[in-house]
Each structure stands twice: as structure tokens, then as C-alpha cells.
Amino acid sequence: MESENFDVIVIGSGMGGLTAASLCAQLVDKRVLVLERHFKLGGFTHTFDRAGYEWDVGIHYVGEMAPGAMPRAFFDLVTGGEIKWNPLPDPLEKFVYPGFTFDVPVGESRYKQALVHRFPAEANALDGYFVDVNRVARWSGLFFMGGMMPPVLRSFLNRLDWGTKRLALSPTADVLCRRFNNPELISLLCSQWGDYGLPPSQSAFLIHAVIVNHYLEGGYYPAGGAGVIAESVRPLVERSGGAFLVNHEVTAVIVEKGRARGVRAVERRGAKTLEKEFLAATVISDAGATTTYSRLLSRVYAEDARRDLNSLPSPTAHVCLHVGFKDDPGKLGFHGENHWIYNSLDHEEIFRLRNELLEGRPMACFLSFPSMKGGVRGHTAEIISFLDYEPFRLWRDKPWKHRGDDYEDLKERISRALIDFVDQRYPGFSALVDFRELSTPLTTEYFTGHPHGAAYGLPAVPERFQMRWTGPGTPVKGLYLAGADAACVGVVGAMMGGVSAAGLVMGWRGLWRLFHAVGKRVKAAATGFRG
Ligand SMILES: Cc1cc2nc3c(=O)[nH]c(=O)nc-3n(C[C@H](O)[C@H](O)[C@H](O)COP(=O)(O)OP(=O)(O)OC[C@H]3O[C@@H](n4cnc5c(N)ncnc54)[C@H](O)[C@@H]3O)c2cc1C
């Protein structure tokens, strides 16, 4: 058993873990150790390659990355300002339904105008809708940052705006049905539900508003692909004596008298495993709330959390077909925008029938082109669709790449169905395909350790946002949660989860330190100075 001391240990190198590690190293000079179970850093921000093609895993577009925007300032702080963000084309997205396609232009007023043009009778309701979206998105910023405020201040702020809180924690469908008469408009406005993985009847309006607001002024993509995020954080952490260890899976958080003391981990070296112990007074888990409470903490500290988290619906799982093209997909008229393709306007039905994909009948998919955004190698696309984890359980204990012919047959059926689904809308797509590989919920579970291959962390139902387990604080002193489960889904959501965890590590001056550092970045962006 090896043992080594650090100031802070971060479990997992996803966006939340990288953020917490970077801020603790840069702002309070902590010696941070990041332990990652995968052989590559980055969590859902890592990239991989096959046959000369390269793909992202969990970034297709990130909003609010224009210079001067607050999330961009935080991102620059975390990554040392090294990342160049390429804007996606305008229109940003296409909502593709049977018989019509709606282009989503960049800019709130242009988006609203396009909607009013199609639904003139709903013009006033649309005004009100955008007011609600902005109001709830603004409120969510305070709500998520509230996790690092003293409880008295947090509960005061919570009480300050009851009306917005009630709106934010209502189901999306209720809010939209109250406001609009036209069901087609309601469906259109919900077209991005794939960004958080739940249909309007189940999702909290909070997450709907956060995502819609996030992309109103366009989408951005990191030049060179998502892998540049971990690459840019690494030297910032190492400069303060920190280290990154891949192939290290944390098996337990060591707790003594209610205080975190470190972690136990296993290192995988080929077929061999080596048990290790790392000590630190602070542990930050980016492994997700479910893993942290149900696998890493003992029952004494986690019983209530486990009970509450188990009461949430099953997390959303997905398949992703990674496609390599023989030639530039621009020849078919694509420009690098995203396509949400649905075979009906009824999102509830689409969600209910998502497992039809197993029989080769997709209900919906998301189509995106990593290579057209100035990123990864080769001409590439990704086609994503949702389904349940359960049908895949059969092969769960079989080794990666050796799960058997029946598993490969299923993957082939799904892959073909997804290509045909896209080809029906965009003829010529199928003929352009040179290489394809499907990831399943088992792939996600195998590489990230997220139980049931959860793509987006805890489901974004209203109840989730009212649980005390889903902020950065935990019942164990010195143990914090980072990442999407500490705030909300998305690269920026996970980053804010990491910001909150780092803020708590910094103590009562944490909030001030963070905003001071980020304020300097905003000022620098305004004057064009790179400090
Ligand atoms: C298919 C897909 C598409 C997406 N598209 C977008 C998009 O376009 N834009 C956007 O903003 N967001 C997108 N997202 C969401 C976004 O990628 C995630 O919300 C975010 O990256 C999550 O970051 P995280 O730090 O919370 O967790 P993760 O990225 O999941 O990182 C957790 C890390 O912890 C490691 N880990 C787990 N357990 C242990 C352990 N016991 N020991 C050591 N390490 C451990 C895992 O291996 C992993 O590296 C997408 C997600 C998916 C799945």
C-alpha cells in the first residue's frame, strides 16, 4: 500500500474536477492531486481517435463564450485563457420535424422574430416567455452559487424571490402550457430537451431556461477539440506542486470523526492492480453524486443521501454513432450547425418510445459535425439518441470489445438505423460514410464509472434541485462535490459546480477571491488586455 500527502485530492478529471483543481492551485496555492480512473484526462471533455478520425465525447457546443461574458471569464480563469473559441455558424441549430425545418438564428431578438413570424397569434406570449427564460436563468446563477454561501445568507436569498423559485421548480410542460395555446409552438420551444435528457413533462423549467438562455447568443467550440481543456489546466496545477494520475480509481473516501482524511484507490497496470492511499485534509469528488454517496462513502455518512437519490427517476442513457466521412460533409449543404431531428412533434411520445431504437426504429436524433467547427482530425459527425440502460445490462460484465456477437449485432442494427434516419432527411449522407463506431450506455459506464451509463448526471427533475445532496457541500467536513451534480448539466454547469467546490475550500473569503479574479478577466476582456 503506497501513501502520499497532498493539500487537496480531486476525484475525477471532468470539467468540474479540472475547474476545482485549477482554482485551488492558482488562487490559494494548494498542492492538488487529481485521480482519474480512465487512461485519459478530461471526463466527458476528452477526445478519442480511430482510423485517422477524431471525435469529442461530450462537447458539441458551449454557449456564453463571447469575450466579456461571465462564463467565458470563469473559463479563461480556469484554463489560463489559453483556449480559442470558434463560433458556430448562424443559424446555430435546425429543428427538423416531419414536413418542416425551423432554423434557429443567433441572437434572442432574431430567434423571437422568427418564432413570431411563424406564430403571429402568440407574439405577446412569446414576449412573456423570453422574460421568464431570462429571469429564471439569472436566478439560477445565484441559486447554484448559493451552495458556497453561508446557510443564513443562502436561505435569505432563497426567500428573496419566491415567485421565480416557484417558476424555476415547476415542470417545463406546465409553464409552457400556461403561457401558450399553440401545441406546435410548445414543441418547437422544447426542441433542445436532448441537451438535458428529459421531456417537458419531467424536466424542471429551471434547466429548460438555463439551456435555452445559454445558447441564445450562439454556440462556440474549442479550437483543436475538447481535449485542449485538460491540456491547458494541467500545467496550472503542476506549477503549484500538483499532479495528475490516470488509471487510478478511487474506491473510498477515508473519513475519521466526520472529517475527510484522504482516499483509497487502486491503480490498474495491465492485468495487475495496486492498492494505494493518498492523504489530504480536503477531498473534492467530481465522480458524481450517486458514485460519491453510494460507492465512496460509508453508509454512516451517506444513508439519507442514498435514500433520496434513489427516489429520483433513472438517469438518461444514450448511444452515440461516431462517423468518419470519405469527403467534406459541406458538399451536402452542412455548415457545422446542429440538427435536432424528430419524427413527431410529440416529445412525450418520443421519450416514451425511445427503446424502439433497439428494434431499428429511431424516434429522434441529434446530429453534429465536430470537424466542421475547427476542431478534430478528419471529416466527422456524431449522431446521438437516447434509450434505456436496462436492455444493455445483459452484457455489463463482459469485457470491453469482447461482449459477444449478439451485442455486436445489436450495435450494427442501431448504427444502420441511425444512418438511415439521417439519410432520409439528408439524402447522400449514407453514401459519404467511410467509418462508424457506436458507443452504448455500457461504453459510458465503462469509461466514466457513472452507474447506468448516466450521460447527464442526476436527472433534472424539480425534486433534484431541492435536495441538499446536489450542491457542493456534503455531511462530511472537508469533502465537497464538484461537476454537473453540484450545479447542473453542461460544460459550464459542471464548471460552476467546480467553482462552488473551490469556493468552499477557500473558506469565507472564497466568494470574494473568485469574483475578484474573474472580475479582472472581465475587465481585461473589455480593454483587450490579456493579463
Ligand atoms: C453525449 C454527450 C453530449 C454532450 N454535449 C454537450 C454539449 O454540447 N455542450 C455542453 O455544454 N455539455 C454537453 N454535455 C454535457 C457535459 O459534457 C457534462 O455535463 C460535463 O462535461 C460533466 O462534467 P463533470 O465534471 O460533471 O463529469 P464527467 O465529465 O463525467 O467527469 C467525471 C470524471 O470522474 C471520473 N471518475 C468517476 N469515478 C471515479 C473514481 N471512483 N475514481 C477516479 N475517477 C473517477 C470519470 O472517469 C470522469 O473522468 C454532453 C454530454 C454527453 C454525454
Image: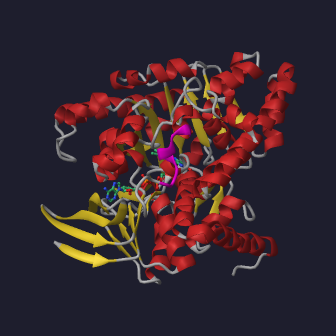
Which quarter of the rendered picture does the N terminus lie within?
Answer: bottom left
Magenta highlight on residue 317: no
Instruction: Give the answer, above or below, for where 395 lies relative to 67.
Output: above
Along the line of sight, the residue nearer the viewer: 418 or 305 = 305
Residue 367, horizontal then vertical, whole percent: 53, 39
Instruction: Give the answer, above or below, for where 14 lies relative to 210.
Output: below
Q: Residue furthest left?
A: 272
Is residue 175 among the parts visible in the rendering?
yes
Along the line of sight, the residue nearer the viewer: 262 or 51 = 262
Q: Give left or right: position of 292 versus 466.
A: left
- Write down the quadrant of residue 114 in the picture: top right
Residue 531, horizontal then vertical, whole percent: 69, 81
Q: Which residues are magenta?
A: 466-473
- Write down the quadrant of residue 407 in the picture: top left
Residue 19, horizontal then vertical, whole percent: 52, 65
Q: Give left or right: position of 373 versus 188.
A: left
Q: Give left or right: position of 110 versus 440.
A: right
Residue at x 34%, y 50% (from the top left corner): 301
Instruction: Give the answer, above or below, for where 432 lies relative to 147.
Output: above
